[in-house]
Image (tube, rainbow, N blue to C red):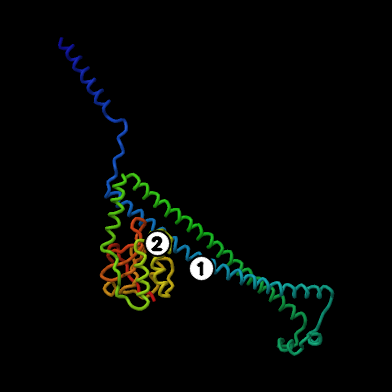
Amino acid sequence: MQHGRKRLSTALVGLTLVGAIGLIPTSPAQAEPDIDDVEARVDRLYHEAEQASERFNDARIELADLQKDLAALNADEDRQDARLDAVREQVRDSVVRQYEGESISAVGQVVVSDDPSAFLAQMTTMSSFDSVQDELFDSYTLETKALDIRAQAVAQRAADVAETKEQLAEEKATIDDKLAEAESLLDRLETEAREAVVSRDSSARTAAPAPTSVPASGRAAAAVQYALAQVGDAYVYGAAGPSAFDCSGLTMMAWAQAGVSLPHSSSAQFSSGPQVSSSDLQPGDLVFYYSPISHVGMYIGNGMIVHAANPGSGVTTAPVMSMPYVGAVRPG
C-alpha cells in the first residue's frame, strides 16, 4: 500500500513539473532597453560618427591638394614631353645626315647659320661636327631621364589620389553605419522614451539660452555673430551651411564672415592661429576637444561655447568644459 502511495506521489510531482514548464514562455520577451544606457550608447555612436566625419574632412582636403599636385605634374610632364620631342627631332635629323654621309664642319655651320654670331657665341671652341652630335645625344638622354622622373611622379600622385578616394568612401560608410546603429537603438524605444533621450541629450549640452549679444570686437565679432545666428540649425556630417553644419563647418563659415579662411577640419583648424590658454579665452577663439582632435566649438564668453554638437542637438551652446578639452587657438 505504501508503494502505491509513493507511485501516486511521484506521478503528481511529475504532473506539477510539466504544468510549471508549460507556463514558462518558450522565448522571453525582449526587454525594453534602459533609457540611460541607450542615451550613453547613442552619444558614443554620434561621437564615433563625428570622428569618422572629421577624418573624412581631412581626407577631402588632402584629395584637393593631391589633385592640384597631379595637375601641376601633368602640365610639367607635357612641357618635358614637348622638349623631348624637339630634341628627338634634332637627333633624327642628325642621324639622317650621318647616314647620308654628310659631314658639316663647325665653320660650315657658321656659314649656313641664319645667325652666325649667335652660333659662335654658343660655342666655346671651333669643335667638329661629331662633337656637336655628341652633345645632342647627351641632351636627348638627359631629357628622356627628366621625362621619366616626371612620369613616375605623376603615377605616384595618381595612386595617392585613388587611395585617398578609397579612404573617403570608407569614412563615409563608417558615418552611415554609426548613424544607422544610433537610429536603430532609438527606434527600440517607445515614442515618449525616445523623445526623452533626445531632450535630455539636448538639455545636457545646453546650459543656458544663446546670448543675444557677446562683447566681441574686430573680426571676432562678425564670426561670433554668425555662429550664434545658426543656433537651432541642424547638424549634418560634412555640411557647412546654409541651414546645416558639422562642427568644423560652422566655425569655418563663421570666420569666413570676418574674411578669415579656415580649412573644413577640426584638426586642421587647430593650426589656424596662435594657441591661447583656457584662462585667456576671448569670444571668437576656437576651442578643441578629444584626442585625437575631432570636435571644435567657438568661445562666446562666460564659460560658454557655441558649436554644432551632433544630430540630436544640432547647433547649440554648451559649457566650455562639457567635453574633453584639448586647447584653443585665436584665428585671424
Q: Position of residue 183 (x, y in %)?
A: 37, 49
Q: Which residue is mark 2?
A: 246
34 or 293, which lies in front?
34
Q: Which residue is mark 1?
A: 65
Q: Of discs 2 and 1, which sits in the foreground?
A: 2
**SS for tag 2?**
loop
Circle 2: residue type: Asp
Say few, some or many: other residues with alpha carbon within 10 Å of mark 1 (under 14 / 14 to 19 / 20 or more).
Answer: few
Q: Could you tell me how far apart the alpha carbons at marks 2 and 1 are, in whole angstroms?
A: 22 Å
Spot the residue most to the top.
1
Residue 66 falls left or right of residue 295: right
Circle 1: residue type: Asp
Picture quarter containing residue 321?
Answer: bottom left
User: Going 27% across and 58% down the picture, which residue do you hit?
Assistant: 204
Say few, some or many: other residues with alpha carbon within 10 Å of mark 2 (under 14 / 14 to 19 / 20 or more).
Answer: many
User: Going 71% across and 74% down the picture, which residue do you hit?
Assistant: 86
203 or 174, which lies in front?
203
User: Going 61% across and 67% down the picture, which residue do you hit?
Assistant: 151
User: Going 36% across and 65% down the picture, which residue do you hit?
Assistant: 296
**SS for tag 1?**
helix
Q: Position of residue 83 (x, y in %)?
A: 68, 74
Query: Contact, CB < 8 Å: mark 2 with mark 1?
Result: no
**Quarter of the figure that contains the N terminus:** top left
